[in-house]
């Protein structure tokens, strides 16, 4: 069984793509709805909450978990991998959504760690919309800069957008908020055209059409769920020792919040009904 973790419903967009690409695997989804949104929490809180979720899924038999939350991946992933995971669960793995996204943007494998600097490469620009904590962590700026220093990363924080999506707020309210964030991004770009736009929060694909509506019509918006699902397939191919094929795949949905509320809104993200149980 593969664990998938998010602070709320957003990770269901990742799970949806994973089940499509990997139909013969079982998944355990953990939504920490009681403590969302992570984008407004401190780094210490995010690390503690994320570690608790990882430990629960490990105890449930997930030797591999996907941190399907950009904020958690940006703030907590390296800390947990290098300390707690290495000492307490050395035979388990945690993967984050940053890895496949950075690989796709830079064209450089994560395993390369640092790409050689070439002064001949033309400058490029990538625009990223994300939560306040993901932007503040500078994780995307740093990881992209290591591998492709010719890329300028322009970030725009979207405070409270996750709350608006999860509420759910009226569509016109979400549209107005996104228009405001896009306007701020356009000011930062100062007329530059980005090579691609990345929605750096797993909640944002649900309103990708509103981002596309607010952005210039011919700007490409990357699909993070599809990037993550393809990367997971490649990873399992390289690590058959942690891959498990199930003749009857199982899906389990858990929440730290209200199960009825979580179940009622899940279809919007997952594409079909999902029945949550409260931890």
Image (cartoon, rainbow, N blue to C red):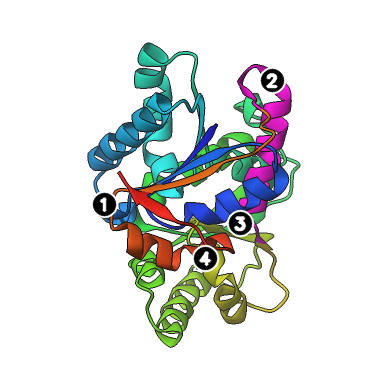
Residue 35: numbered disc: 1
**Is the magenta region chiefly helix, strand or loop?**
helix
What are the residue bounds of the magenta stretch? 222-244
Between residues 71 and 183, which one lies in front from this camera angle?
71
Q: Measured from the top left, where is residue 105 in percent x and y?
A: 66, 48
Q: Which residue is mark 2?
A: 240
Spatial CA distance of label 3 from label 1 is 31 Å
Bin the neighbour count of mark 2 within 10 Å (Cα to Cα): few under 14, some 14-19, many 20 and up: few
Q: In this rendering, which labeled residue sits more in front, label 1 or label 4?
A: 4
Residue at position x 34%, y 20% from top?
84
Residue at position x 63%, y 31% from top?
110
Q: Is residue 5 above or below residue 222?
A: above
Residue most extreme to the front = 248
Q: In this rendering, which labeled residue sits more in front, label 3 or label 1?
A: 1
Q: Which residue is mark 3?
A: 126
Left or right of residue 264: residue 205: right
Residue at position x 64%, y 51% from top?
17
Residue 267: numbered disc: 4
Q: Secondary structure at mark 1?
A: helix
Q: In this rendering, which labeled residue sits more in front, label 3 or label 2?
A: 2
Q: Measured from the top left, where is residue 21 in percent x and y?
A: 71, 45
The quadrant in which the C terminus is found is top left
């Amino acid at each position: 069984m593969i664990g998938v973790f998010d602070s709320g419903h957003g990770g269901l967009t990742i799970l949806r793509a994973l089940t499509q690409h990997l139909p013969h695997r079982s998944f355990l989804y953990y939504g920490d709805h009681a403590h969302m949104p992570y984008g407004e929490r401190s780094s210490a809180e995010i690390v503690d909450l994320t570690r608790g979720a990882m430990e629960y899924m490990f105890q449930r038999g997930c030797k591999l978990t996907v941190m399907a939350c950009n904020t958690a991946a940006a703030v907590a992933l390296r800390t947990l991998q290098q300390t707690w995971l290495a000492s307490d669960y050395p035979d388990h793995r945690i993967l984050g959504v940053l890895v496949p996204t950075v690989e796709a943007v830079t064209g450089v494998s994560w395993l390369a760690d640092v790409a050689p600097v070439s002064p001949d490469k033309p400058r490029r620009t990538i625009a990223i919309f994300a939560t306040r904590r993901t932007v503040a962590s500078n994780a995307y700026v740093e990881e992209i800069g290591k591998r492709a220093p010719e890329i300028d990363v322009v970030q725009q924080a979207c405070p409270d957008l996750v709350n608006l999506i999860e509420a759910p707020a009226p569509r016109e309210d979400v549209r107005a908020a996104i228009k405001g964030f896009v306007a701020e991004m356009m000011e930062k770009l100062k007329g530059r055209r980005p090579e691609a736009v990345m929605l750096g929060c797993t909640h944002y694909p649900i309103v990708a059409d509103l981002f596309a509506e607010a952005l210039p019509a011919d700007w490409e918006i990357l699909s993070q769920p599809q990037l993550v699902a393809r990367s997971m397939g490649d990873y399992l191919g390289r690590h058959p020792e942690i891959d498990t094929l199930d003749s009857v795949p199982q899906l389990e949905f858990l929440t730290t919040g209200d199960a009825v509320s979580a179940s009622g809104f899940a279809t919007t993200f997952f594409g079909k009904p999902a029945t949550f149980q409260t931890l």
